[in-house]
């Protein structure tokens, strides 16, 4: 190995170690890129409809987003926060109810199979359930207290929003900076790959937005028909958590089932059936209809990406697992397969 090659290898290893040590900052930068792509998508739609310049389209897009956020804060957030607080307070009651039903089920089973006294030790273990329920309530209270301390999280959010806004003002300039980091012979190709990643992210975000709105609407209608309380909070949670595949829909089912369990076990089962129906409609009808241009990801790969990025980057990695997987799939297809493996296979066969 020549001196120059060894020095380049050493520099590459040092860069990888540096990026690994700064991986939390890197994933925050990626979150800023995702938000910037969302804003650029809106700007593109405004420019296409109004035939105006990019700065004017950006100002109109920001003004529209501010108005939308203000309306949401005024009309949606207050009832959502009130109902969500009631929802958290009812979780310990639902846990007590579930424990009582489980104990009753075990009691009936023991009478049928073993006799009256066969599972007394299990029933005694349930006798100490009050302390565990108190611990659950205390844990929820601690969670609410922890949510009040948003100093570090707020700074990170401001950092992501500021970087996203700066990228959205001059997206081409920032893309060219990334292109210049590649060798000169590959810069043109890298520019094409980055454009494809941007198109994939834009189509994914548009599809997820429409899909989440449909899930929230269907969940709200279904819960209203079933007579479940706190419809607004549960419907909004279903729409928001729909952004996180596999994990999000499961979490969104816990809250309405807990509320319904306080009324009747059969109503809780009806809520479970409703959410299974909504998720199947979302998976097999809504998503294929609104995401025709989306990069298709297999469910197993999506779950693996969620696990991997959560381990590497924490909770933010779980939230960004799908856009990371979308970009990674484009990079693997274009760079690894088309640019490396296909020419290598052609050289071997020739």
Image (cartoon, rainbow, N blue to C red):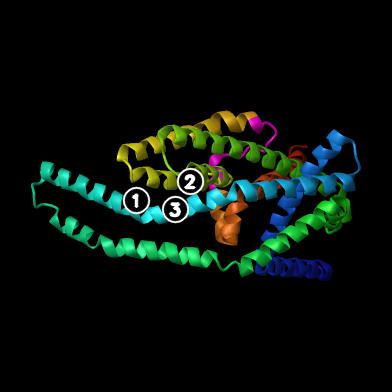
Callout in the foreground (3, 1): 3
Whether the magenta-drawn stretch holds residue 279 is answered as no
Q: Which mark is residue 235?
A: none
Whether the magenta-drawn stretch holds residue 294 is answered as yes
> What is the x, y in percent for residue 326?
66, 45
How far separated are the C-alphas under marks 3 and 1? 12 Å
Which of disc 1 and disc 3 is earlier in sequence?
3
- Count of numbered tags: 3
Q: Secondary structure at mark 3?
A: helix
Q: Which mark is residue 94?
A: 1
How far separated are the C-alphas under marks 1 and 2? 15 Å
The residue at the point 22 percent across, 58 percent down is 126
The residue at the point 62 percent across, 69 percent down is 151
| Vertical side of 241 occupied by 143: above or below | below
**Residue 312 appears in the picture as rendered:** yes
**In this picture, which residue range is highlighted in magenta?**
290-303
Which of disc 2 and disc 1 is earlier in sequence?
1
Which of disc 3 and disc 2 is earlier in sequence?
3
Who is closer to the viewer here, 78 or 341? Answer: 78
| Vertical side of 149 occupied by 75: above or below | above
Q: Which residue is mark 2?
A: 252
Q: Is residue 49 left or right of residue 271?
A: right
| Vertical side of 278 occupied by 234: above or below | below
Who is closer to the viewer here, 16 or 313? Answer: 313
| Vertical side of 63 occupied by 124: above or below | below
> What is the x, y in percent for residue 222?
47, 33
- Quadrant location of the N terminus? bottom right
> What is the x, y in percent for residue 24?
65, 64
How far separated are the C-alphas under marks 2 and 3? 16 Å
Q: Secondary structure at mark 2?
A: helix
Q: Which residue is mark 3?
A: 86
> What is the x, y in percent for residue 271?
40, 37
């Amino acid at each position: 190995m020549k001196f120059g090659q060894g020095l380049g290898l050493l520099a590459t290893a040092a860069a990888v170690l540096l990026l690994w040590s700064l991986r939390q900052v890197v994933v925050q930068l990626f979150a800023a890129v995702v938000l910037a792509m969302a804003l650029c998508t809106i700007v593109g739609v405004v420019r296409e409809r109004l035939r105006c310049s990019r700065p004017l389209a950006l100002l109109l897009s920001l003004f529209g987003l501010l108005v939308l956020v203000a309306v949401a804060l005024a009309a949606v957030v207050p009832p959502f926060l009130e109902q969500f607080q009631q929802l958290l307070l009812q979780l310990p009651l639902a846990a007590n109810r579930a424990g009582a039903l489980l104990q009753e089920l075990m009691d009936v089973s023991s009478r049928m199979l073993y006799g009256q006294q066969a599972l007394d030790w299990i029933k005694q273990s349930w006798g100490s359930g009050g302390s565990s329920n108190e611990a659950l309530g205390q844990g929820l209270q601690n969670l609410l207290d922890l949510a009040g301390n948003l100093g570090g999280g707020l700074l990170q959010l401001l950092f992501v929003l500021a970087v996203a806004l700066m990228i959205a003002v001059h997206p081409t300039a920032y893309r060219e900076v990334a292109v210049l980091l590649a060798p000169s012979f590959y810069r043109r190709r890298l520019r094409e790959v980055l454009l494809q990643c941007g198109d994939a992210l834009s189509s994914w975000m548009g599809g997820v937005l429409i899909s989440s709105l449909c899930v929230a609407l269907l969940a709200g209608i279904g819960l209203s028909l079933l007579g479940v309380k706190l419809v607004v909070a549960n419907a909004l949670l279903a729409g928001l958590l729909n952004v996180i595949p596999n994990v999000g829909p499961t979490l969104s089912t816990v809250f309405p089932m807990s509320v319904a369990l306080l009324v009747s076990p059969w109503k809780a089962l009806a809520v479970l059936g409703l959410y299974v129906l909504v998720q199947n409609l979302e998976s097999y009808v809504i998503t294929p209809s609104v995401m025709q241009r989306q990069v298709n990801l297999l469910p197993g790969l999506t779950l693996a990406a969620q696990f991997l990025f959560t381990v590497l980057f924490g909770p933010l990695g779980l939230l960004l697992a799908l856009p990371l997987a979308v970009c990674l799939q484009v990079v693997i297809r274009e760079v690894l397969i088309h640019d490396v493996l296909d020419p290598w296979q052609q050289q071997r066969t020739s």
